[in-house]
Image (cartoon, rainbow, N blue to C red):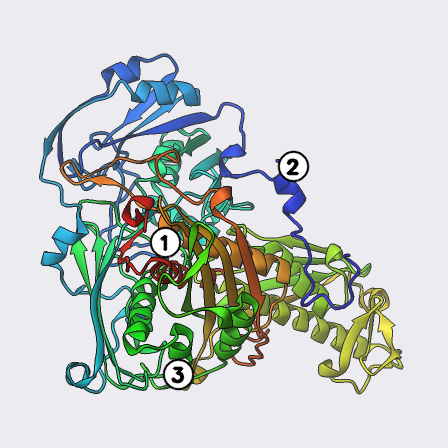
C-alpha cells in the first residue's frame, strides 16, 4: 500500500495511527520526571462576585501538599499585563488566573494546590473554604440580548458585518413571499477525548520543556514567555500528539499558566491536568439569537436578506465570530443588510468551536431559506439552485473555484432526492414519518503564513520539520505524502517532526488552513532541495544535467533525473558525496498573496442531504441517512479527508439534536458538566453517512490546490436536520438543539 507511486489522492492510513491505537503516542499529561509535582485547580462556585475570604490552612496541612496558590500569594513572576496577548486572543482583558478577588464566571479557577501526588492535590483542594460576595448572574442570552452592543473593537476586520447593499427593507416590503423568524441556539461545550493538561519538565539549568495540549506549540511558547517574562530560548513547548481539540486548544488554558507558574516558583517539574468537569468551564460555542428576514418573488428569486445576530460573550472579553456575513454571499441577492452584536454574560469567554460563526449562522440562514422555499412553493433544492451565485457579492470578489453545483447534483443523485414529495408529512415508512431536508454550507479557504524544512538523505529518506500540529486531522500523514510526492519517494520513507515550538514557524492549527499552508510550505521546501541538488550537480564535471532547469527535473530511484528522459541524471548519493555533504536541506516558506486577495477569494462548499424517521406516535427522531457532498479543491488523502467530514457531520448532528450547556439561570451555574448529562451523539444516533468529494480544480486557493476541509463538514448540518424534521412533521423548529421533548 505504501508503494503507491502517485501518492497524491491515495487513501494512506494515518502514519500515527498505530502509535495512537496502541497507547504508545504520549499525550501532554503522560510525560514523567522523577520528583515531579502535581497540581489541581480549585474553582469558584458562584457565577459573579468577589472572594471575601479564602482559607487554605487545612489544604496546606494535608499530607503531601507542597503549596497552595490563591490571588493572595500569586508569584510576582506572573504578569497580568495587557500589553502581551496570545496569537488568537480577542479584544478585552484575558483571564489571568489568580489575578485578583473577582469572580467572572462559574468554574473560574481561584486556587491551585500543588502536592507530591495527583491524589493529594485533588483531595486537599476539597478542604479549601471560600466566602463569597455574590452578584446577580446574567447567563440567559434570550434575556441579555436586550442589552446587546456593537463590539467597540473588532476581533478581525473580516468579522465585521459587510456594508448594506440595495434596499433590504423596501425589497422585503414589496416582495410577495417572506419569512421573519427568530432562531435560538444554546451554548455548546468542547469535549475532546484528551483533557487539557500540561507537564513542565524543568532541566537543571532551568530550561523548561513544556508538554502542552494545544493547537499551537509556538502560541503556547510565546504565551509562557510573554506572561512570565522568560527568554524565548529557555522554553520549548511540545504538542507532538493532540487528542482532539477543534478550537478549544487555540488559546492557552489555565493549566498551562498554573504548571509553569508553579514550576518557576518551586523550581520543580510540575504537571497540571484538568478534570472533565473543568472542561465545561472553558471556551465554548456561544449561545446565539438570530433574526432572519428573507423575501422572494413569485419565481423564487431571493429579493431581500436581513440577518441580525446577538451572541453571548463574557464580562471581560469581546469574543466575536463571523456569523452573519455568510448570508450576504451564499446566494445571489441585491438587497442585503447584516448586523452582529454581543451580549455580556457572567460566563467564561466563548471560543472557536469547529466552523465558528458559520456553523451558527447557517443554522438560521439555511432554516430560513427552507421556510421561504416552502412559502414560494418550490422544492428547497431547486430554490437554492435558482439563487446560485458565482462571485462573492459582499466584497465583489471573484471566487477561485466553486463546484457547489456539482455538490448539489451529485449529492442529490446519491441521496435519491428526485423521489421526494414536497408536502410535509407525505412520506412514510411503516410506522415512521419520513422527512428529507437539505442545506448548503460555506467555509473560508485560507492560507496562513507557514514555513517548513525538508531534508533529503542519499538513501532516499526524508525528514520534514515544522511547528505544525496534528489535532487528529491527519497532518502527519499528508505532510509525509506531500514530501514523498515531490521528492519521488514512498511515504514510508518520510519522518515527520511536528508539534514543537523550536521547529519552523507555523500558525496555530485552526481555520482549516493547515493542509493548504503547511502542505504548501513542505512542497516549497522540496523545491528548494531540488534546486540545491541541481546547482550541486551542475558543478560536477561532465554533468548530464548541465543545461537543465529545476522544472525539468524529477527524482526517481534516488536519482535526480530529467523528467522526460530519466537515463539523464545522477545518483543523489553521488551529487552529495562529490560535494562532501551527507544530506541536503530545503527551507520552504509561503504566505498569502496580498495582490491576489484584492481580486479573488476562496471558499469551500457543501451540500447536505438528511433523512429523518420519526415514530408517528412517540415522536422519537432518528437521523437515518446523511449525504454530505463537498467541494474543497484537491483531496490529498481521501481517507483522512473523509474522516474529517464524518467528524464534522457527527458534530453537526449533536448541534442539531443534542448538545447544550444547561445553565441554571437563577444561580448562573452550568448543571450538566459531565458526559453523562451533556449529550453528544452516541453510536446508535449515527447511522448511514456518505461523503462525496466532487472534482474541483483550483490553482489560486493554495500552491498545492488544496482548500482544507476540517470545518466545512459541520456547516449546514443542523439546518438540514431541522428542515428534514419539518418535512416529516410539518412543524418548524427554531430552537436548537431540537431535543426529543420538543418533537413529541
Ligand atoms: Mo478551528 S475552530 O479554528 O480549531
Disc 3 element: helix
Front: mark 2 or 1: 1
Badge 2 element: loop
Q: Nearer the viewer, residue 298 or 317?
A: 298
Contact between marks 3 and 1 (CB within 8 A): the answer is no
- Name the side, left or right, on which 329 lies relative to 47: right
Mark 2 surroundings within 10 Å by alpha-carbon count, few (fewer than 14), some (14 through 19), many (20 or more): few
Q: How many marks?
A: 3
Number of other residues with Cα within 10 Å of mark 1, as a class: few under 14, some 14 to 19, many 20 or more: many
Report whether 302 appears left or right of 691: left
Rendered position, 169 above or below 138: below
- Distance of label 3 from label 1 (alpha carbons): 26 Å
Closest to the observer: 223 or 129?
A: 129
Residue beneath label 3, please?
386
- Which residue in the structure is indicated by mark 2? 22
Q: Position of residue 694 (x, y in %)?
A: 57, 73
Residue at left offset 30%, top offset 83% = 333
Of residues 422 and 117, the one nearer the viewer is 422
Amino acid at each position: 500500500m505504501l508503494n503507491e507511486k502517485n501518492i497524491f489522492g491515495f487513501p494512506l492510513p494515518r502514519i500515527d495511527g498505530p502509535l495512537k491505537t496502541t497507547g504508545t503516542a504520549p499525550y501532554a499529561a503522560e510525560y514523567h520526571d522523577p520528583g515531579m509535582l502535581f497540581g489541581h485547580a480549585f474553582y469558584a462556585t458562584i457565577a459573579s462576585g468577589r472572594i471575601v475570604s479564602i482559607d487554605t490552612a487545612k489544604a496546606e496541612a494535608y499530607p503531601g501538599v507542597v503549596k497552595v496558590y490563591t490571588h493572595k500569594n500569586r508569584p510576582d513572576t506572573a504578569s497580568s499585563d495587557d500589553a502581551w496577548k496570545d496569537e488568537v486572543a480577542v479584544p478585552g482583558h484575558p483571564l489571568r488566573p489568580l489575578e485578583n478577588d473577582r469572580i467572572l464566571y462559574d468554574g473560574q479557577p481561584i486556587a491551585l494546590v500543588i502536592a507530591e501526588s495527583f491524589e493529594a492535590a485533588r483531595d486537599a483542594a476539597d478542604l479549601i473554604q471560600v466566602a463569597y460576595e455574590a452578584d446577580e448572574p446574567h447567563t440567559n442570552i434570550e434575556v441579555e440580548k436586550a442589552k446587546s452592543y456593537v463590539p467597540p473593537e473588532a476581533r478581525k476586520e473580516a468579522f465585521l458585518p459587510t456594508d448594506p447593499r440595495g434596499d433590504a427593507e423596501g425589497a422585503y416590503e414589496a416582495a410577495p413571499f417572506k419569512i421573519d423568524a427568530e432562531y435560538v441556539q444554546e451554548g455548546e461545550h468542547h469535549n475532546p477525548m484528551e483533557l487539557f493538561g500540561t507537564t513542565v519538565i524543568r532541566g537543571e539549568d532551568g530550561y523548561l520543556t513544556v508538554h502542552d495540549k494545544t493547537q499551537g506549540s509556538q502560541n503556547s511558547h510565546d504565551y509562557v514567555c510573554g506572561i512570565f517574562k522568560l527568554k524565548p530560548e529557555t522554553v520549548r513547548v511540545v504538542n507532538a500528539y493532540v487528542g482532539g481539540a477543534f478550537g478549544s486548544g487555540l488559546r492557552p488554558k489555565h493549566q498551562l499558566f498554573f504548571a509553569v507558574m508553579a514550576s518557576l516558583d518551586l523550581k520543580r517539574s510540575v504537571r497540571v491536568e484538568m478534570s472533565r468537569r473543568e472542561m465545561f468551564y472553558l471556551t465554548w460555542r456561544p449561545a446565539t439569537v438570530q433574526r432572519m428576514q428573507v423575501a422572494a418573488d413569485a419565481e423564487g428569486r431571493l429579493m431581500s436578506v436581513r440577518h441580525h445576530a446577538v451572541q453571548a460573550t463574557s464580562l471581560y472579553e469581546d469574543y466575536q465570530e463571523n456569523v452573519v456575513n455568510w448570508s450576504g454571499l451564499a446566494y445571489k441577492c441585491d438587497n442585503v443588510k447584516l448586523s452582529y452584536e454581543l451580549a455580556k454574560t457572567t460566563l467564561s469567554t466563548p471560543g472557536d468551536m469547529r466552523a465558528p460563526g458559520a456553523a451558527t449562522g447557517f443554522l438560521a440562514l439555511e432554516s430560513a431559506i427552507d421556510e421561504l422555499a416552502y412559502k414560494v412553493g418550490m422544492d428547497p433544492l431547486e430554490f437554492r439552485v435558482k439563487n446560485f451565485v458565482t462571485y462573492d457579492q459582499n466584497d465583489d470578489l471573484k471566487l477561485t473555484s466553486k463546484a457547489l453545483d456539482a455538490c448539489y447534483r451529485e449529492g442529490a443523485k446519491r441521496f435519491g432526492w428526485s423521489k421526494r414529495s414536497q408536502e410535509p408529512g407525505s412520506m412514510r415508512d411503516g410506522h415512521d414519518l419520513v422527512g428529507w431536508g437539505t442545506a448548503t454550507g460555506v467555509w473560508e479557504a485560507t492560507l496562513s503564513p507557514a514555513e517548513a524544512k525538508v531534508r533529503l538523505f542519499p538513501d532516499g529518506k526524508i525528514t520534514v520539520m515544522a511547528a505544525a500540529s496534528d489535532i487528529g486531522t491527519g497532518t502527519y500523514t499528508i505532510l509525509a505524502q506531500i514530501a514523498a510526492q515531490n521528492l519521488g519517494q514512498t511515504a514510508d520513507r518520510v519522518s515527520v517532526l511536528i508539534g514543537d515550538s523550536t521547529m519552523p514557524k507555523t500558525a496555530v492549527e485552526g481555520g482549516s488552513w493547515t493542509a493548504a499552508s503547511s502542505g504548501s510550505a513542505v512542497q516549497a521546501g522540496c523545491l528548494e532541495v531540488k534546486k540545491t541538488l541541481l546547482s550541486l550537480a551542475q558543478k560536477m564535471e561532465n554533468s548530464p544535467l548541465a543545461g537543465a532547469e529545476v522544472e525539468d527535473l524529477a527524482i526517481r530511484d534516488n536519482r535526480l533525473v530529467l523528467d522526460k528522459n530519466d537515463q539523464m541524471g545522477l545518483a543523489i548519493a553521488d551529487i552529495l558525496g562529490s560535494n562532501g555533504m551527507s544530506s541536503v536541506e530545503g527551507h520552504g516558506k509561503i504566505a498569502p498573496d496580498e495582490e491576489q486577495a484584492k481580486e479573488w477569494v476562496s471558499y469551500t462548499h457543501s451540500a447536505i442531504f438528511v433523512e429523518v424517521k420519526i415514530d408517528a406516535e412517540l415522536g422519537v427522531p432518528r437521523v437515518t441517512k446523511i449525504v454530505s457532498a463537498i467541494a474543497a479543491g484537491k483531496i490529498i488523502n481521501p481517507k483522512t479527508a473523509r474522516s474529517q467530514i464524518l467528524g464534522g457531520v457527527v458534530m453537526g448532528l449533536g448541534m442539531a439534536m443534542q448538545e447544550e450547556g444547561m445553565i441554571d439561570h437563577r444561580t448562573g451555574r452550568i448543571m450538566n458538566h459531565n458526559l453523562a448529562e451533556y449529550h453528544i451523539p452516541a453510536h446508535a444516533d449515527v447511522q448511514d453517512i456518505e461523503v462525496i468529494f466532487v472534482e474541483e480544480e483550483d490553482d489560486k486557493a493554495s500552491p498545492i490546490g488544496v482548500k482544507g476541509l476540517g470545518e466545512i463538514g459541520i456547516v449546514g448540518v443542523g439546518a438540514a436536520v431541522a428542515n428534514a424534521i419539518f418535512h416529516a412533521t410539518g412543524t418548524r423548529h427554531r430552537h436548537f438543539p431540537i431535543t426529543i421533548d420538543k418533537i413529541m
